[in-house]
Image (tube, rainbow, N blue to C red):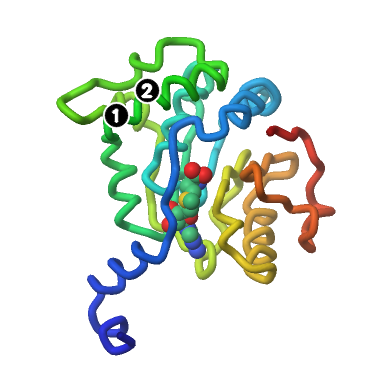
Amino acid sequence: MQHKLLYDSKFFVTLLSDLTINVTEMFRDPSFFKVLREVVIPELKKQPFVKVWHAGCSSGEEVYSTAILMKEEGLYKTSLIYATDADDVVLDKAKFGVFAIDRMKDYTTNYRKAGGLASFADYYTARYDNAIMDNSLKKNIVFSNHNLVTDGVFGEMDMIICRNVFIYFNRDLQDRVFRLFSESLRPGGFLCLGTKETIRFSSFSDDFENVADHE
Ligand SMILES: C[S@@+](CC[C@H](N)C(=O)[O-])C[C@H]1O[C@@H](n2cnc3c(N)ncnc32)[C@H](O)[C@@H]1O
């Protein structure tokens, strides 16, 4: 396999996609998005322009959720969301913004639990088995390939959302990525992690202060 990996770039993409775990959903852990809306967004509203980095965004469900939330909070027009992943296969899906219609029922429930203000169906058009996300949500999202293990700092962010990615990294790798995030955030910027992830035991825990917990 080593020879094929070195000389066949398509094979590399396929293998990488097989090895990465891309499970995701819209408004995953609704309580997270509720806290985002109630605690973090009011702080971000104080900025004239907001830059958000979704690291390890998978097929984009989480990114569209943030875009919806920011739109409802009147923050989307003055924001830019960078959505990155190391896996081009899922990244292409994210750019496309088309999801299986049969997931929308669960996503609607998540959206409501997350404190959604409108009707979730307003954000997509149903066509056959698909839900096509509203184009207006894509306007301020930049999708690109970025590998947290090998690539560098991403710019001065106001918020980094990296959820359910650290659980796959060992301690050394976690520290490397926490350093990357620490250097990519402006002072006072927010780092959002998954429910099973914490910065508490890393060498960078002193750089951060806990603002909010969620279930
Ligand atoms: C389980 S998904 C999480 C998706 C989303 N953040 C969520 O919580 O629903 C993990 C994602 O991390 C990505 N990933 C894994 N290692 C990565 C790396 N070194 N750099 C960037 N992305 C990575 C995978 O490709 C996958 O899409």
Q: Reply above or below: 159 against 174.
A: above
Please name the residue that numbered disc 1 is placed on: 102
What residue sits 51% from the left and 34% below the top? Answer: 28
**Circle 2/circle 1 CB separation < 8 Å:** yes
Tally the numbered discs. Answer: 2
- Where residue 30 appears, as percent x and y from the top left, is 56, 28
Q: Name the one closer to the observer, 179 or 131.
A: 131
Q: Name the one closer to the observer, 109 or 48.
A: 109
Local crowd at mark 1 within 10 Å, few (<14), some, or many (≥20)?
few
What residue sits 26% from the left and 35% below the top? Answer: 98
Q: CA distance from mark 2 to mark 1?
A: 7 Å
- SS type, badge 2: helix
- Where residue 27 appears, as percent x and y from the top left, is 50, 30
Q: Reply above or below: 178 against 196.
A: below
Side of 141 where 113 appears, left or right: right
Q: Reply above or below: 11 against 148.
A: below
Side of 209 where 143 appears, left or right: left
Where does the C terminus fall, quadrant-wise? top right
Residue 130 badge: none
Please name the residue that numbered disc 2 is placed on: 105
Where does the N terminus fall, quadrant-wise? bottom left
Whether the residue carrying mark 2 lies under 8 Å from ligand 1 is answered with no
What residue sits 40% from the left and 17% below the top? Answer: 120
What residue sits 61% from the left and 40% below the top? Answer: 159
Q: Residue furthest left?
A: 128
Local crowd at mark 2 within 10 Å, few (<14), some, or many (≥20)?
few
The answer to which image quadrant residue 133 occupies is: top left
Side of 203 where 148 appears, left or right: left
- Where residue 193 appears, as percent x and y from the top left, is 64, 45
